[in-house]
Image (cartoon, grey):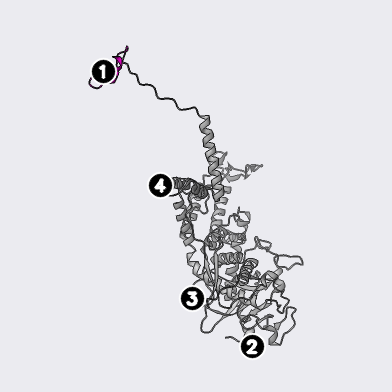
Amino acid sequence: MPNVMDAYFRKSFLDSINTNENKARKNESLRKMDVYQKRQSKYVNEQLIKEYSSQTVQDMRVISSINLCNRIVNEKASLYTKTPDREFSTRSKSLLSDMQQAQLDALYEYGMMDVVFKKSNRMYVLESQCAMQFIPKNGVITSRILLPHHYDCFSKYDDPETAEGYVLSVYDKSLLYNFLPKDADGNYLAGDSDGIDQVSADADDFKAKLNRYIWWTKDYNFITDARGNIIDPLGRPITDPLEILNPIELLPFVDVAGTKEYEYWVRQGNDVVEFSLDFSVLLSDTAETNKRQSYSQAIVYSEEPPKDQLVGNNVIMHMKLDRNSEIQPKFEWANPSPDLNASLELLEMYLRLFLSAEGQDPTMVSGKATATKYNSGVERLLALIEKFEASADDMDLFKWVEQKALKIMVAWSNLMQGANIKGGVDPLIPELQQAMLPDDLVIEVKYQQPQGIQTKKELEDSQVVLIENGLTSRKMALMELYGLTDEQAEQRLLEIAEDEMEADDILPPPPKPPMPNLFNGAGDMPADDTGDVPKALDTVTQ
C-alpha cells in the first residue's frame, strides 16, 4: 500500500493529477455531465463551428433546447424507478430486535437512500462509473455522488482495478471551457462564467477551494495543499498523525463501475451524449435551411444597380449585364424549393435507429404527437419486460453496491451512537440513535419486476367468466374490481338488489299468452292430425 504519510508520495501523486492525460479524463466526464444537465449549447456550437465558422454560427438559428440525453439516461436507469424491497438478516442467523430494525429503517429514510441510489444508477448509466461517499452530515448518515472529474484514486499494487485510497478535489472547469470556441471579442460562445470568482455566488465559486485536496484511506483522513502539506480546514499545518485517523477504519466509498480493463478507470464512450449533440446539430442544420430558403429572393438584371435595393426579406441580388448583351433588364423572384420533408424524415429515422440500437422503444421519443397504446395487458407486459431487461445487467452490480453501502452506514451509525466525532460533525438525530447494529448484517434487495396490467374491460370480462363457472361470487368480484372491503362489497350487493326490486315494480307485468283458437273458420271444430274431431270436444258437444 502506498504510504500516504510520506510527503514525497503525496507531492508526486498531486503532480500526476495535473497531467494532460488525467485532465483529458476529467474533461470528458465534465462534458457528459454538462450535456445531461442540459448545458449542451456550448458543445453544439463547437461542433457547428467545425462545419461552418464562428461568424456563421453566430448568425445561425442554433437548436440546442431539445436535449434527448437526460430523457434517455433516465429511461435506461430504471432500477430505482420504484422503491425496491429490502430485507435484513445476519450471517450468524441471529434475529434482529425491533429497535435494530427501526434503526435500519431510519437510516434509509432520513438518509434518503432511495433518492441517492436512483441518482447513482443514473450517473452510472451516464458515466459508466461513479462513486458513492457515505458521511455523517447534519445529524444523518448521507451520501454524495461523485463523478470521475471529482476525484482521483491510487490503486492496489496487486489489483489495479481496486482503489487503495481516494483524493477528492474541486475540478477547475476552465480547463475544459478554455478549449471551447470564442466569438470575435474573445467571449466564450454560450459560456457559463466570466472566469472571475465574484463576491456573490456565481459559476466560479469553485475557485475558492482550488488547490485543496481531501485524502481518504482506511487508516487516515486529512486535507493537503497543492504541495502535499497536511493542513487543517483553516490552512494551518498538522504534524500529529493521531489527529488525522480515519474513525471508521474503512474507506467510506463504493465504486459503482462496469467492466474494467486491468485499471481503475472505466474508459468508455457514451453514445447517448454523442447522439444528443449530433441530433442538435442536425436540427440546427435543418432549421437554418428552412430559414434561408423559406422566402423568395429578388433579382434585378440591369447594367447599373438600382438606387433603392431594399426589397423583401433582405436586399436584392444584382447581376450586372454586359452593354452588348441582348438580355434586357428585368426583375424576378427566385423561388427556392428545399426538400424539408426529406430532412425531417432523416431526423426521425436517425432517432429510431439510435433508440433501437440502445434497446429502447423507438416511440419513447417522437417527433409526432402520438402516445404508445397497448391492445391488452399482455402487450403492455411485454413492453415493460423489454425496458426492464435493458437494466437487468445492472442488477447484480447494484445488489453488491447496496451491500457495501450498508456496511459503511453501519460503521458510521455504531461509531456515533450517543457520541460525537472531531471536526465539528453534528451528533446523530434521536431517530438514528436507537440501537447498535450487528457487524455481519446482510441485505437482500428485490427490485420491482414488471407485472401484467389488465385493461378495465379485460378485468371485468375475466370476473364474469369466473362467476359463470362458479369459481367466484358476486361479492368477491366486486372486491376485485373496485378494491372494496368485505363490508363494502356486501353493502354494494344490497344496493344492487334494491335497485333491481325497484326496477321490477316500475315495469308492467308481462302479457298473458293468447288463448288457443278452438274453432276453424266459421265455428267449425278443429281437427286432429287424422282429420277427425277430438274426442274430448266431441263428448262435450254431445
Image depth: mark 1 or mark 2 in front: 1
Judge whether residue 326 can be spotted in this image.
no
Tell me if residue 528 is in the magenta stretch: yes
Where is residue 240, by image quadrant? bottom right
- Relative to 53, say whether 517 is above or below: above
Sequence-first disc among 4 and 2: 2
Magenta highlight range: 521-542
- Relative to 366, say whether 34 is above or below: below
Sequence-first disc among 1 and 4: 4
Disc 3 crowd rating (10 Å Cα; few below 14, some 14-19, many 20+) is few
Name the residue carrying label 4: 469
Q: Amino acid at mark 3?
A: Glu
Spot occupied by residue 451 in the image (x, y as percentages of width and height)? 48, 56
Q: Amino acid at mark 4?
A: Asn
Image depth: mark 3 or mark 1 in front: 1
* CA–CA distance in space, label 3 to label 1: 109 Å
Sequence-first disc among 4 and 3: 3
Q: How many marks?
A: 4
